[in-house]
Amino acid sequence: MVAQRRFGMDHEHYDWSPIINRPPLRWPENARVAVCAIVNLDHFDWRTPDGAFALPNLPGGIGPRPFPRFDTYGHRDYGHRVGIFRVLDTLEKHGLKATIAMDQMTAENYPYLVRHIQERGCEIIGHGVAITRMITSRMSEEEEREYILAAVSSLERVTGSAPAGWLGPEYGESPRTPQLLAAAGVQYLCDWTNDEQPYPMKAPQGNLHALPMMVDLDDQVCLSQRLIPVMRYGELLKESFDRLYHDGAETGRVMTLNLHPWLIGQPFRIKYLDEALGHMMTRQGVWCATGREIIDWYRSQVSDT
């Protein structure tokens, strides 16, 4: 969609909807907060293909360097080899089934991880082709359509079912991405970080909703980009939850965390996630859910109002 100069919102991806004007949202058993953990399994290409776009300051490793960027590759690969198991163990300890954002390269090259994640009952959602191959406006519509279909069909072939959700590599989109995702059968999108409740998005084909991410609590944003000390990151998780829990007495809120196993799965960091989740689960009225469970419940509530 092309941006327009006009009063109010300058695009038509969704309707303007201030949270104080919406009907109360009620989660299962009248929970105040739905907590969802999205865990990224994104592959870092040994060599970025010609024509692909990767952020020049992509976190990981020691810093930018010429090919081969083995330090960044190795840092990211730690998440696939070690960190993912530590993160999943920590989430399960507190009753959370992870929603795994898995890209095409991971799905096709790490069959053990696919089987392990499925055996643990996690949801798998689309995550593009690779972290070094972002969706951008540099793509033509046909190139982007083929990219999305390749990622979605790969997950369907490897896992046995098409992904219901999508998180773009590095939140990457073009102006037409939501509509192309909906046409490909994707039901919810995690790139938009502008709310504390799900909401419907507009698409000529399909039925697409946003599951908003809390980008200020994204471990990569906090720890690698803003260089927030990990002790403070743990406190931010607790403080954010406490406020959402307070506000959830009026209308349900969603706390969607974006986690990267190569980062939060490090042995000196994981305890801060563990402690924060322990703090959250001491409260009554917390619903631990996957992305699809949240969107399915939201749709049922909205259709009943």
Image (tube, rainbow, N blue to C red):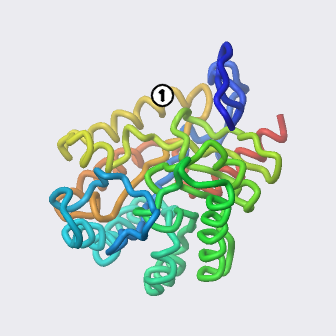
> Local crowd at mark 1 within 10 Å, few (<14), some, or many (≥20)?
some
Image quadrant occupied by the C terminus: top right
Q: Is residue 241 visible?
A: yes
* Rendering coords of residue 21 (x, y %): 69, 19
Residue pictured at 63% horizontal, 54% vertical: 140
Image quadrant occupied by the N terminus: top right
Residue pictured at 65% horizontal, 56% vertical: 293
Considering only vertical position in the picture, is 35 above or below 155?
above
Q: Nearer the viewer, residue 16 or 286?
A: 16
Residue carrying label 1 = 246
Q: Is residue 95 visible?
A: no
Considering only vertical position in the picture, is 66 above or below 174?
below
In the rendered view, does 134 fall on the left or right side of 9? left
Q: Nearer the viewer, residue 55 or 120?
A: 55
In the rendered view, does 223 fall on the left or right side of 44? left
Callout 1 secondary element: helix
Quarter of the view holding residue 233: top left
Q: Nearer the viewer, residue 169 or 45?
A: 45
* Rendering coords of residue 104 (x, y %): 52, 73
Considering only vertical position in the picture, is 8 above or below 34?
above
Amino acid type for the residue under numbered disc 1: His
* Rendering coords of residue 200 (x, y %): 72, 40
View extreme (top): residue: 7
Marks counted in the figure total 1
